[in-house]
Image (tube, coloured by chain):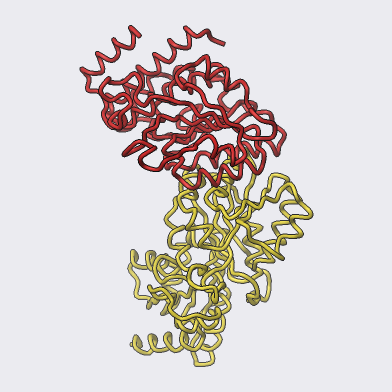
Amino acid sequence: MRNTFAKVLLEEAKKNKKVIFLTGDLGFSVFEDFQKECPDQFINAGVAEQNMTGVAAGLAMEGMIPIIYSIIPFVTMRNFEQIRNDICYQNLNVKIVAVGAGFSYGPYGHTHHGLEDIGIMRTLPGLTILAPGDPTEARLATEAMFKYVGPTYLRLGKGGEPIVHEAEPLFTIGKAIELSKGRDITIVTTSNMLSRGNEVRLDLETKGYSVGLVSMHTIKPLDVSFILRLSNSCRAIFTIEEHSIIGGLGSSVAEVLAEQNNTVIFKRFGVSDRFTKVNGSRTYLQKANGLNTETLSESMIHIMKKKKI
Amino acid sequence: MKDIGQLKQIAREVRKNILTMSARAKSAHMGGALSVVEILVTLYYQIMKNNPKNPEDPKRDRLILSKAHDAKALFAVLAECGYFDKKILEGYEMDGGILAGHSVRHAVPGVEASAGALGHGLSIATGVALAGKKSGQKYKTYAILSDGECDEGSIWEAALFAGHHALENLVVVIDHNKLQGYGYTKDVLNLEPFAEKWESFGFGVKEVEGHDMKKLSSVFSKTPFKKHKPSVVIAHTIKGLGGMKQHIGQISSQYKPPTQDELADLLIELEKS
């Protein structure tokens, strides 16, 4: 996803001299081409994310299109007040781009995990939140972000995420992508859990369930009407996210369902409300948090059997 | 350009409005509004390219009040300049009024940035200055900071950045009234050697008496102080100047608005000054 973003960014910067890319001292072996081809539009703002965010606000006030970039905690949490006051409160056209969704930086430890960002960013009025599911969506989301005028947060994985979409889907900010429909279960994923959702779908289908798969690539504005339609067209909705169980996709969908009369079975799958005590790769940490295909599949079957009328 | 007598008269009017707004809204944050009056009057009337009839003029100089708890001083000066009707000042911090206690971008013409959380405005001003430099425009950007605000780490992030990028179109003005929220700056977190700190971050530095508009004018007209360097003006001021005598130079100047009776006396005093 990171390289996909870098590619689209370079194309956009070449088209529009107002695009200014600011990085918090990250991007080795990712942005060298950009730096070479658009040197006047590249700023390494140093390890100073609060200032980078305020500077971006100032640039946007003068009609520039700044992008600020770092790993999730450093470009959403360290500088949260600057995002709130300088960017969102002033409704400025700044793009916040973060890498490291969930356990993408698994072995680095909890300081580098991106597990609370959706929850906190979702509280900011006027902020559009994009969390593409695979490299294809990452490209489409980046393009859509540049067409859109207004504060935007783009949540990316890192590298190596598999392509899930067989064909290029229609990508519209605020409109969920339904990859397949299911009568029994619909798995709704966001961000880098699309491929996991797809694996779980395939597994459940071999066990006799009719399963749909949805990429909720926009967390805000949320596709509320789609969720409501879904709650009437299948028996169960399961959300999967590599994010805290508090505040993310699952919470967003739960908020919609809880305020409507419906009988749909609903369960959130995400990272439990605790600091991860074990260390390891993304795959290892997913498993430690029950986000591997086998555990997810078993949990879903268990729920479906329990609720069978 | 105004002569010094006219400028003093304007500053007097601004102080009257600050005191009246504070008394009406029973609002805090008066001391720093009173200490920054001459800085703002000098900038808007003598130094900055600005036109109240065309507040969005791309050629205008920009001013970002980072110490935005003192926004009422900015509002009073902008109203005095004619950016908007003085009647709007009556709604300051009042139910349904247009003016909040801290500045909101474009709430009234002339207010460039929303601010209020300390340590943000210098980064924003730095971005504005950088945009000007990148696009080859001639405007200058002024950022007004409080001294207490310089406790914030983000100020020094911005200072590093502005120095590194040689933003000679950026002028930082520090309203150095030596007092912050709950103590003297020297007792809370000593800023000294203050001028040397800025110098070491790559700024040209000048210190000035912050209530002497002749001297302020002369210093401001010399920016940039050094080629390819941003400038900082450390303006030595007195917190609460023109307010109630018992609060001048005291922490209480920040928190104790005058009662209506006290206001009446203060307005008479100011008229005589």
Pinpoint residue A216: horizontal percent, then vertical percent: 52, 67
- Colour assignment, chain A: yellow
- In-front residue for pair A263/B77: B77
Pinpoint residue A220: horizontal percent, then vertical percent: 49, 58
Quadrant (top left, top right, bottom left, bottom right) of the N terminus of chain A:
bottom right
- Classify residue B232 by image quadrant: top right
The answer to whether residue B198 is left or right of residue A167 is left
- In-front residue for pair B225/A75: B225
Q: Residue at x 50, y 36 (%)?
A: B194
Chain letter for the red part: B
- Classify residue A202 by image quadrant: bottom right
Q: Would you say residue B50 is visible in this rendering?
A: no
In this view, the residue farthest toward the left is: B261
- Classify residue A10 by image quadrant: bottom right
Pinpoint residue A136: horizontal percent, then vertical percent: 66, 69
Q: Would you say residue A222 is visible in this rendering?
A: yes
Pinpoint residue A213: horizontal percent, then vertical percent: 53, 76
**Count of marks, rendered view:** 0
Reply above or below: B209 against A277: above
Reply above or below: B204 against A66: above
